[in-house]
Amino acid sequence: MRRSLFLPTARQTNWLLIVAFLAVGQALYIRYMAIENLNRELACQAGLQTWLCTAFRVSIVFFNYNVFGWTALGAAVLNLWRPSLLWTSLALAAAGFGVVLHNADLSALAAGVLILSLARPASA
């Protein structure tokens, strides 16, 4: 008997949409309100202690070490090997952050692997 493909249900698809929109929205907010906003960037580098400055500093460190891209690629490969909603959510969120925050090379590869994982049989 053939096993069915990994196809998220309607509820799971809604969850994945929420994860993707929140990740990309937060990444866009950090990019355009902290990283590319010169006044806020200078204030954060001068030592301003707000949550946006903390997110700015963390995203700069993550960018330097390609954390978004490697996390997205790792989760996408694990999702290709054994499809699950957890790995799909993690890969989708990390790929969204990576594409927006200039880790597009590995994040785009992870998005491609994530699309390939939809053709895999679902885990038992």
Image: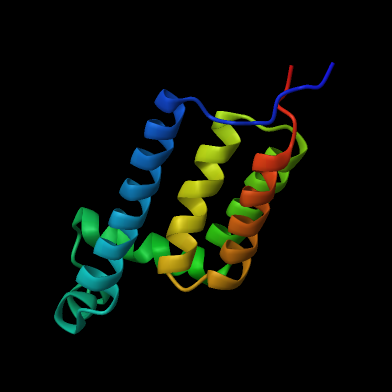
Left or right: 55 with respect to 62? left
Q: Measuring 60% from the left and 37% from the top, which residue is drawn there?
A: 87
Q: Is residue 27 above or below residue 41?
A: above
Q: Measuring 56% from the left and 39% from the top, which residue is drawn there?
A: 88
Q: Quadrant of residue 86?
A: top right
Q: Position of residue 106 (x, y in %)?
A: 62, 66
Tell me how many marks there are. Answer: 0
Q: In this view, does 123 lie above or below 105?
A: above
Left or right: 92 with respect to 122? left
Q: Residue placed farthest to the left in the image? A: 39
Which image quarter is the N terminus in? top right
Q: Measuring 62% from the left and 29% from the top, which residue is drawn there?
A: 84
Q: Front-most of 6 and 110?
A: 6
Q: Residue placed farthest to the right in the image? A: 1
Which image quarter is the C terminus in? top right
Q: Position of residue 118 (x, y in %)?
A: 65, 41
Q: Where is residue 89 in the image (x, y as percent from the top left)?
A: 50, 39
Left or right: 75 with respect to 51? right
Q: In which quarter of the image is residue 42?
A: bottom left
Q: In which quarter of the image is residue 70?
A: bottom right
Left or right: 15 with respect to 90? left
